[in-house]
Amino acid sequence: MTEHSHPGQPAVQHSSGERYWELDAARGAAILGMLVFHFAAALVMFHLIEETETLLKYYNLYAFGTAVFVLLAGAAMVLRHERMRVRGKTNSEYYKTLVIRALFLFGIGMLITLVTWAFSIVMLDGQTFIKFGFLHMLGVAMLIAIPLLRFRKWNIVFGLALLAAGLWLIPNFTSPEWLFPLGIHGPDFLQYTQDYFPIFPWAGVLLLGVGLGNVFYPDGVRGFKLTYRPKAVIRFLAKTGNGMVTLIIYLVHMPIIMAALTIFCALTGMGGL
C-alpha cells in the first residue's frame, strides 16, 4: 500500500488499495502550472519576452496553484499515518519518518541554494540565487507541523493564524534581514533571489492542509462519496502528481529550461542572460 504525497513522499491509498486520484490530479495540475510559470519567467530572464502586466497577473494563478500543492502536502502527512498504522508501525516510527522526510526535503533545498549560488557566480552577479525556496519552506513547515498533528482539525485555526501573521504582520518588519526565512526582508531583497517561500505565511498553508485532511480524510480514509470516474486528462494529471514524480519534475525542470534557452539564444543570437 502506497501513499499520496507532496514532493518526496510516495502516494497514499486506502488499505483496500483504492487510490486517492483526486489528490494526485490536483497536485498534477499544480505542478504543470508551475512549469508554465517558470518557463515564462525564464523567457523574461533571457530577455526573450517582456514582463507585462498580463504576465504579472498570472503570478496570482501560480500562487494559488502553489497553495493547493502545499495544502495537499499537509493532507499527505495525515494520510501517511493511516498507511503506517495499517502496516503495524508505531506512532514514534510515524513521527520519525516525517522528520526524516522533512530534513531530506530541506537538504535538497540547501543543495539547490549551493548550485544556484555557484551558477550566479559564473553567469550572473554572485548575489542572485535561491536563498529560501519551496523545498526549504516545505521541510521546515513539516517540522513545525509534526508536534501539532495531534490537534487534528484545530490545525485549521493554527494555519489561519500563521497565514494572517504572514500576510499582515510580518510585512511590517524589514530587519534584521537574516530572518528572511520568516519573511522579514528589505525592499530590494526579492531582486536577488528567486523561488522565495517564507515560513510566514506558507507554513500556515501546510497546517491548513493538515486540518482539512482531518476533516475530509478522517483517520486517513476518504470521508465523502466520490462517484465521478476520472477521464484521460484527469488520469494523466494523477500520474503526473503521483509520488516521487513531482519531486523529480521540480528538480529537473529549471536546469532543462535554462539549458534549452541558453542553446536557443546561442544558435539564434536572440536574447541571452
Image (spheres, helix red, strand yellow):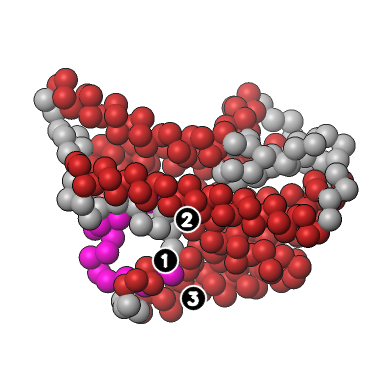
Q: In the image, is 113 to the left or to the right of 242?
A: left
Q: Amino acid at mark 1?
A: Pro
Question: SS at mark 1?
Answer: helix
Disc 3: CA contacts within 10 A as few (<14), some (14-19) or many (>=20): some
- Of the two numbered discs 3 and 2 in the rendering, the one whose residue sits closer to the viewer: 2
* Identity of the residue drawn at 43% across and 79% down: 169
Residue 51 appearing in the image: no
The N terminus sits in image quarter? top right
Q: Mark number for residue 228?
A: none
Between disc 2 and disc 1, whose residue precedes?
2
* Identity of the residue drawn at 38% across and 72% down: 179
Q: Position of residue 159 (x, y in %)?
A: 60, 69
Q: Is residue 149 above or below residue 18?
A: below
Q: Amino acid at mark 2?
A: His
Q: Position of residue 223 (x, y in %)?
A: 82, 51
Q: Amino acid at mark 3?
A: Ala
Disc 1: CA contacts within 10 A as few (<14), some (14-19) or many (>=20): some
For label 3, the residue is: 165
* Identity of the residue drawn at 76% across and 55% down: 94
Q: In the image, is 17 to the left or to the right of 234?
A: right
For label 1, the residue is: 181
Give the magenta-colored segment's residue range. 181-195
* Identity of the residue drawn at 25% across and 29% down: 261
Q: Are marks 2 and 1 in contact (CB under 8 Å)?
A: yes
* Foreground of the two, 122 or 135: 122
Is residue 29 found inside the magenta-colored segment of the image? no
